[in-house]
Image (tube, rainbow, N blue to C red):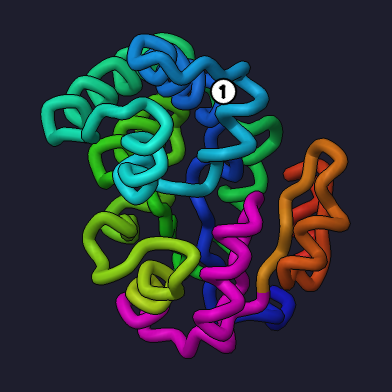
Amino acid sequence: MRQAKFDAVLFDCDGVLVDSEPITNGVLRDMLAERGWQLSIEECMAIFVGKAVKDESALIAARTGQPVTEDWLASFRERRNAGLTLGLQAIPNILDAVRAIHAHHEGRIACASGADRFKVELQLRKVGLMPYFEGQIFSGHETPRSKPFPDVYLAAAAALRVDPRRCAVVEDTVTGIAAGVAAGCTVFGYAPEDEADTLRQAGAVATFKNMADLYPLLA
């Protein structure tokens, strides 16, 4: 086995492991429309992708004129989870990539997400990735600060007993890349569309369009 460039690989979840953003933001767009804030799915994703909805409570309240209550957030999570359970799919080629990276790094991989734990675990089970991340899942809801702060990546590195500077991070958003860079990790940007320049400007050392390219890039 070749010597690994990194001691551990830390994955974001939404948009990296699972294609959840259109589903989650479709639900969010509908619920915002019910409160009078009309957005297209593209506009909704531009505002909210990479961010926890609860962290955007002030913006939502300002645009809708209604407070973001715990009941409203609970309703959002319930409707979101129903949509994910029905239609979620893995990112193309991610299963083979994770399998190879997990073997190459002798299990030293983790999922470090800004989402709530229930959502992350639901998604990983749905697409068959849970066996690779069981016991190594970290949620920004459980750290003092979520992305773009580094807390969730620092927590993952500490749990794996790996120096963050020896960790690779796989991200797809500016917010997530900022978190990985702030943690001292080397960040790789997944850019299946035309976002490579934006992700590199945010601090990604390299970008790639296909998950089939990730294992060679890291190994």
Residue in the image at 67% along x and 70% along y = 187
Whether the magenta-drawn stretch holds residue 49 is answered as no
Residue in the image at 36% along x and 40% along y = 53
* 154 horizontally vs 188: left or right: left
Residue in the image at 62% along x and 17% along y = 40
Residue 156: image location, x then y, percent? 37, 71
Helix, strand or loop status at disc 1: helix
Question: Where, by quadrant of the figure, is residue 217 drawn?
Answer: bottom right
Residue 9: image location, x then y, percent? 55, 67
Is residue 73 among what the camera can see?
A: yes
Determine whether 131 is above or below 85 in the image.
below
Residue 102: image location, x then y, percent? 53, 59
Determine whether 114 is above or below 143 in the image.
above
Is residue 131 among what the camera can see?
A: no
Residue for badge 1: 22
Residue 149: image location, x then y, percent? 44, 71
